[in-house]
Amino acid sequence: MMRLAHVALLSMLIACDASTPRRGEPPTPEQPPAAVDERVVFLRRAGDRVEVVARGVEEIHGIAFRLKWDPATLSLGNAHASEAWSGHVLVVGKETAPGELAGVWSERGPAPGIHATGETVLGWLEISSSADQAVPAFVAERSKVVDAKGKRVDLRFRNPN
Amino acid sequence: MRARLICGCLLALTLALPRLAGGSRPREAMRGDLLSRFVAAERRATLDAIPVMGPPEPAGLRSTLDCLSAEHEVTLDPVSGIVSASMTLRLKATGGPLTAVSVAFDQGLELDSTAASDRSVSAADAIFAPSRIVEMTLDPPLRAGEETTLTLAYAGTLQCSPRESGGVACRRDPDFAYFAQSSFFPFVFDPAAPGSVEFDGLTRDVVLHVPAGNDVVMSGQKVSQTEDGGQTTSRYVVDKPLTRTVGMYALVGKLGQKPIATQSGSATLVFPPPGEPIDDALVTWSSSALDFVERSVGEPLPFARGLSLVRLPKALGDPGTATFGMTLLSDSYRRMGDVLYEETWAHENSHLFWGIVVPETNSSESRLMTEGMATLTELEYTFARHFPADDRDEYLARRFVPIGLDLRAHLDVPSIRVPLDSALTSDFRGATYMLWAYYRTAATLDHLRVTLGEDVFARTLAEYRQRCAFVGCSPSALEEIAEKKSGRDLTTFFERWVTASERPRVVIGFEPTAAGANVNLEKDDARPMTLELWVTLMDGTRVKQKVDLQGETTLASLTTNGAVRNVSASPRHDVLVDVRSAVDGDLDFDGEVDGFDALRCTRLVGQSYTSRGATGLFEILDPSTAFDPRCDVDDSGTIEDADLARITSAFETRLR
C-alpha cells in the first residue's frame, strides 16, 4: 500500500513537472484562452504536500487564498511558493485559527505574471499529519487571483467533491 | 504647466506687470503708490516665468470704481496697426469716493483728449512696456453713489510688443490679426486698487471699422456687419453686465472659420488660415463640449446671436480664456494629447456659464464657482466622452488621487475662500494658484456633492445659477442655497473646507450582524460631518448610505439585504477626509489584513508619485498604473517593499 502511494506521488510529480511552463514562456498559439469553467485553481495531495495548482489562466501576478480544513484529520505547516514565480515573490501564510489558513503569493512590481494555461503548481503547504487523503478546501469568496494590471481573473476555485 | 483662467483676469493682471520702460510724460505725475505697486509686481513676475494669474489683492485694496457701460468706436488697420479710437464710459463710485480712473492700452497709442460730463479731468500717463497707463484724475472726486460719464479719444500705431512673459496683447497681420484687451480695447481700472476684480457689471457696445475685405470676429454678440466706402463696419454688443476685467478680443483678417453643430444657437470655430487637421477635431469636440455643458447646466447658453470658439496659435502666448460669446484656447495644449486637449476645451467652454453668465462677486476672494466648477465639469466631460463604461465614482476618485497628492504636498495653499483683508504670500502664482483655484475647489465641490447627494447638489447649482447670473455671488450664497436644498446645517462643512483646509481622520470599524452591520466611526473632533458609506455585500453588491457623524464617536446600525463584507467610505471623500480602517493595513475595509490587501499593492511596488506642483489634473488615467496612496503606508511618495512589509506584518490581524 505504501509502495503504491509513493509510485502514485512520483508519477504525479513527474506529470506536474512536465506540464508546468517555465516562467515567461508565452502561451502557445494553439492554446486559445480558456473558458471560465476551464480556468481553475485547485488543491491536490502530493505526498507530504498539498499543492495549489492553476490551469487555463493566461496570467497570474498574484494569488490570495484562504483554506479551511478539519483540524482533527489534517494538520498543515508552512506555505511555500513554487519555482514558477520569480525570485522576488512575496510569500505570506498564516494559520489564523485551528483549521484555517490565509496566504498570498505574488510578484512584486511590474513583473509579468505566470503563464498558467497548462497545469501549473503555484505553491504548496507542508502536511504535518493527516488521515487518509484529507485535503483542505478553498474559501472561494476570500480567495482571488489577479493579473499584472491588478484585475481580478475570472476563474473558479475548485474544491474536492 | 497648463495655465488657464477665466475672464480677462490674466490679461488684465499680466498687463499690470509690464516692464517699466520710462514714461512719455513726467512719471512724477503718476500716483506714487501705483508706480511702486507696478514695479513691485514686475519684480515678482521676473521671479517666475509662469504668467501671473490673478493673485488676491492684499489688505484694503477694494476698488470703488463701478463701470456701468462703455461705448467703443475704433478705426483699425490690422496690418499697419494704425488706430483711431474713442471710448465713452459711464461709471459710478461704489463703497467710497473715486478720485481717479486709469486705462491701459498699447504703448503706441496716445491719449488725445479726455473729459467728464460734469467735472474736470486731468490726465497723466506713463509707459510700462508694452502698455501705456493713463491716469485721469476727477475734480471733484466722485462721491460714493455718484455717477459720471468719461470720454476718451486716443490714437496712434499699435506696437504689439511682447510682454516680459513672452505673450503679446496684439498681433498685426493680414490673415489672423489679434487684438486683446489692453491693445486698442482699454483695460479700465481703479489706480487705488489696480488688481481689484470685484464684479461691477459693465455692458459694452463696440463699433469697429476695418478695411473692406477683412473678416471680423469680436467678443460679444454680433449686431451688424456692413461694407461701405472701402470699410467693413462691425458692431458687437455685450448686452449683459460683466466684470470690467472680462477680456475683449477682436480677430481680423482672412480668418479660418468652420461651423459647429450645436443644440441651440450658432457657433463657429475660428482659427488662423489655412487651418490644420486639428481644426476638424476641434469642431467635433466643440459640438460635444457645448452640448455637454448645456446639458449639465440644464439650460442653453445665452448667446443666441452666435458663439465664437477660437484656436489661438501658440506664438501669441495667450493660454486662452472665456469671454462674452467667445472662448479662446491656445493650441499649445495639443502637447498634452487629444484627450486632455479636448478636456481643456470643455473646461474653457464651461466658463461660458461658470464665470461669464455666473461670475464670482470677487474672484480674488474665491474661484470656487468658476474654476472649481469648470474643473469639475472637465472631469465629468472626459468621463462621459471617454470612460463611460467605468464606474463613475471610481473614475472620479481616481482623477482626484493625484490632485489630492499635489494638495498634500503643498500645505501652504490657501483655503478656498480667502479673506479679502488677508495678506497672502507674494509667490501666490503658478502652481500655488492652480492648486488654490482649480484643485482645492473642484475636490471640495465633489466632496460636497457626495455629502449632499447628486440630486440635491444639482438643485443647489440650479438655484445658484438663477440667483447669481450676471450679478455675481460669493461662496456664502452656495452655502445658503445648499442648506436650503438639503435641509442640513452646512456651517461646519464650510468652516472645515472652504474657509479652512482640514483633512480630518475618520476611522471605520464594523461588526456584521444578522441584519447588516454595526458600524463604528471615530474622529478626532466633535464637529459634525457627513460621509457616504459604501457597504459591500458578500455577493459584491454595493450599497451606499449617508451617515451623519456626531461627536467623536458615531455608532450606526446598517440594515442590508445580505451579509456584509466591507464597510468603507466613498473614495471621492479621500482628498478632504483621511478615511482609514480600524485595522492598520486593512486597505479594503473588510476588517482584517489579508491577501486581498497585499494584492492591491504588490504590483505597484516601485511606483512613485512626485508632486511637481500642480500637474495632478493631467494624470490620466489607467487604473492599472495609477499610484495608490493607500499602499504608500509611510507617505514617502514611493510604494516600497517596506510598505508591503508593514501591511503584511499585520497579516490576518482582525477586528473581530
Image (cartoon, rainbow, N blue to C red):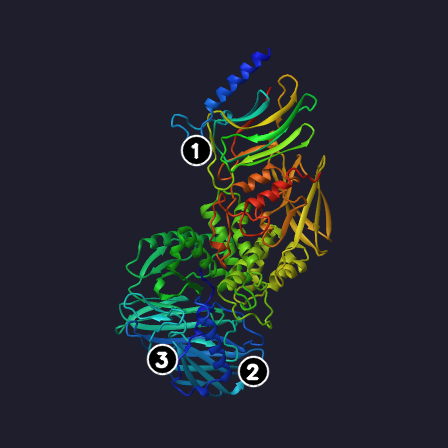
Q: Chain of mark 1?
A: A
| Secondary structure state at the residue bearing disc 3 | strand
CB of mark 2 within 8 Å of CB of mark 1?
A: no
Q: Quadrant of residue B504?
A: bottom right
- The picture places residue A31, in percent across and down from the top left corner, at 41, 26
The residue indicated by pointer 3 is B109
Kindly report the distance in space between the C-alpha atoms of the residues bearing marks 2 and 3. Answer: 29 Å
Q: Which mark, residue A24?
A: 1
| Position in image of residue A110 (x %, y %) | 48, 41
Q: Would you identify the image quadrant in which residue B82 lies? A: bottom left
Q: Is residue B62 left or right of residue B557?
A: left
Asked if marks 2 and 3 touch (Cβ < 8 Å), the reply is no
Q: Secondary structure under badge 1?
A: loop
Q: CA distance from mark 3 to mark 1?
A: 72 Å
Q: Residue at x 69, y 50 (%)?
A: B548
* As drawn, B466 above or below B518: below
Give the chain of mark 3: B
When asked about the image quadrant of residue B87, the answer is bottom left
Q: In the displayed image of the protein, which residue is found farthest to the top?
A: A1
Q: Nearer the viewer, mark 2 or mark 1?
A: 1
Residue B340 or residue B469, whichever sits in front:
B340
Both labels 2 and 3 in a single chain: yes
Above or below B200: residue B119: below
Amino acid at pointer 1: Gly
Mark 3 or 1: the one toward you: 1
Look at mark 2 in the image and give the residue it sits on.
B97
The Cα–Cα distance between marks 2 and 1, rounded to whole angstroms, is 79 Å
